[in-house]
Image (spheres, grey):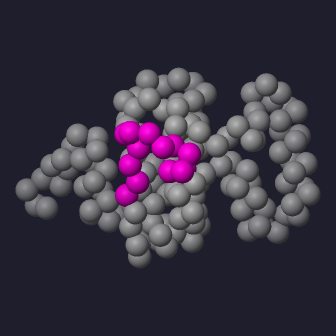
Amino acid sequence: GAGNSLFAWDRFGFNVPRMALIGCFSNATWVTNRFGEILGIPKAVLVKMRAALEQRYEGKLNWASLDIGRFAQRFPGELLMVHDRDDQEIPYFHAEKIMATAVRPGVTLVSTSGQGRRSILRDRQVIARVADFFGAADFFGAAA
């Protein structure tokens, strides 16, 4: 989701003033490598798969260019990234890599701990922070 949002902005030019990315990977090659690890697919097969896809979609797909940090650097609006230090599916180093590349005003990283991959999406503080980022500061209403 998160990385694909920036990819879609880059590829299709969606006019959005801000974007929130939660638990984002730093590049698409890592995603395919991780997919291969989980399923036990040899690295050589993954390399051939990526090459075949680049050939099939020549001029439209280049794995090396699918770098989320570079997309984040070019994104003209505000960007809020939220990543948990204990995310086991997409480790925290991805947030650090994106932030190291997307060094510009308007890019903010909110780090949490102890949430992991799934709980971060239900955390009231995270939800409130993201809602506030989008201008919905009173997202929870008076019950909060």
Task: Quadrant for residue 136, please give it.
Answer: top left
Residue at x-position 86% and y-position 32% = 56
Residue 118: x and y in percent read: 46, 66
Task: Quadrant for residue 129, please give it.
Answer: bottom left
Quarter of the picture containing the C terminus is bottom left
Residue at x-position 65% and y-position 49% = 27
Of residue 97 and residue 119, the one placed in the foreground of this image is: 97
How many marks can you see? 0
In the rendered structure, does residue 101 fall within the stretch colored magenta?
yes
Residue 63: x and y in percent read: 75, 41
Residue at x-position 27% and y-position 62% = 125
Residue 126: x and y in percent read: 32, 59
Residue at x-position 57% and y-position 30% = 10
Numbered range of the magenta stretch: 98-110
Residue 34: x and y in percent read: 72, 62
Q: Is residue 29 left or right of residue 96?
A: right
Q: Is residue 29 left or right of residue 54?
A: left
Of residue 64 and residue 118, the one placed in the foreground of this image is: 64
Q: Can residue 24 be seen in this snapshot? A: no
Q: Is residue 4 left or right of residue 39?
A: left
For residue 93, above or below residue 103 = below
For residue 29, above or below residue 87 = above
